[in-house]
């Protein structure tokens, strides 16, 4: 079985994206496959887990080592539920439905979003869900969710524009005195602004802010300190690879190189020499069968597994890596063709 066949042998949430991004499937076939997300597989399963109050909950922790799992299981039950992020919360459940490509016009999506709009509020100060709250990382995700599902989130967008930092990034610690952008927060905001532009069309001030944020990533070669060129998320005390060089899925609020590159691809950015080392990193992780592994899964409660486990080939990572490489190499070919045309003229 070749890689594309392996990718297609899975849930509709992945299959329709493979058809769209990696094959020549007709648009109507892609649309038909995407429509299945609402009624089959992970999408239907996740929709069914929403409570009547609009919230999601439940799930079990996942661990990166047996020792961590044994330690957690040895704790009293009252402590087990408070030590790890709950990726089963409402926000992360909606982010997954968006990642699955759930059709916003489907009956399941309309019902789920209506319940969230009418019944869900933020812990911060009881704000209605689609009004957002105060942290730009949370608000970036809320914009992505709201724009995708057709909600009015323009006030949150305007707030984010006013919170962009002088280096082009965003940082949830700004209110605590931070003066520099954060990769984690910036990628959340960039994905949100891009989804907003998809929903309403290009808005000059939004596009300008997004491109400034995009430049924040590019100036740092997608993972390096501007001041020293060192990999930002590298622990000098250990031999462990920098977390940002390991590809997780779902990424949740965490930045990594593949997530950053997949944003650039989705944004239609024209890659330049600043992304070449990041592309080389992606290519270096492909195994002998042309697949990419799941790396560094983030501990926390999950609704259900969507991959075969850490170190095993990951369909999500393989899909994202293949479409990133396709975007990059197509741009390289177009640039070479343009250069050749100029040389002949």
Image (cartoon, rainbow, N blue to C red):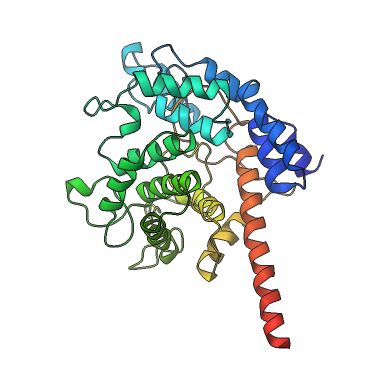
Q: Quadrant of the C terminus?
A: bottom right
Q: How many marks?
A: 0
Check the image and report above or below for 74 versus 317: above
Side of 295 relative to 163 (left or right): right
Query: Could you tell me if residue 241 is visible in this image?
Result: no
Quarter of the figure with residue 205 = bottom left
Taking the spot 32% from the left edge, 68% from the top edge, the residue there is: 227
Is 286 situated left or right of 212 in this image? right
* 195 up-or-down from 131: above or below: below
Q: Is residue 40 visible?
A: yes
197 relative to 111, above or below: below
Q: Position of residue 139 (x, y in %)?
A: 33, 39
Outermost residue toward the right? 1
Seen in the picture, residue 66 relative to 159 is either above or below; the reply is above
Residue found at x 30% / y 47%: 158
Residue depicted at 26% across the width and 52% down the height:
162
Q: Who is closer to the viewer here, 79 or 22?
A: 22
Q: Nearer the viewer, residue 37 or 253?
A: 37
Q: Quadrant of the N terminus?
A: top right
């Amino acid at each position: 079985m070749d890689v594309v066949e392996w990718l297609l042998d899975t849930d509709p949430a992945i299959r329709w994206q493979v058809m769209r991004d990696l094959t020549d499937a007709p648009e109507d076939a892609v649309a038909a496959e995407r429509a299945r997300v609402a009624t089959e597989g992970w999408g239907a399963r996740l929709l069914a887990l929403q409570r009547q109050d609009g919230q999601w909950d439940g799930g079990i922790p996942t661990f990166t080592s047996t020792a961590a799992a044994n330690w957690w299981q040895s704790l009293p039950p009252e402590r087990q539920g408070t030590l790890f992020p709950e990726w089963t919360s409402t926000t992360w459940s909606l982010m997954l439905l968006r990642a699955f490509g759930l059709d916003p016009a489907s009956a399941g999506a309309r019902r789920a979003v209506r319940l969230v709009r009418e019944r869900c509020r933020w812990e911060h100060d009881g704000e209605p869900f689609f009004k957002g709250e105060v942290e730009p990382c949370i608000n970036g995700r809320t914009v992505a969710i709201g724009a995708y599902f057709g909600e009015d989130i323009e006030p949150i967008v305007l707030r984010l524009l006013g919170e962009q930092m002088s280096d082009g990034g965003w940082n949830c610690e700004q209110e605590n005195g931070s003066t520099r952008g954060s990769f984690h927060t910036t990628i959340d905001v960039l994905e949100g602004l891009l989804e907003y532009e998809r929903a309403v069309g290009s808005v000059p001030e939004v596009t300008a802010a997004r491109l400034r944020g995009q430049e924040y990533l590019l100036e740092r070669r997608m993972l390096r300190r501007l001041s020293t060129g060192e990999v930002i998320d590298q622990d000098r005390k250990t031999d462990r690879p920098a977390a940002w060089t390991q590809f997780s899925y779902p990424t949740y609020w965490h930045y990594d190189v593949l997530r950053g590159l997949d944003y650039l691809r989705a944004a239609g950015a024209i890659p330049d020499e600043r992304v070449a080392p990041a592309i080389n990193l992606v290519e270096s992780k492909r195994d002998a069968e042309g697949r990419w592994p799941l790396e560094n899964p983030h501990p926390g409660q999950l609704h259900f597994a969507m991959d075969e486990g850490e170190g095993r080939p990951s369909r999500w990572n393989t899909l994202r890596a293949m479409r990133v490489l396709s975007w990059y190499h197509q741009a390289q070919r177009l640039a070479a063709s343009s250069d050749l045309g100029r040389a002949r003229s």
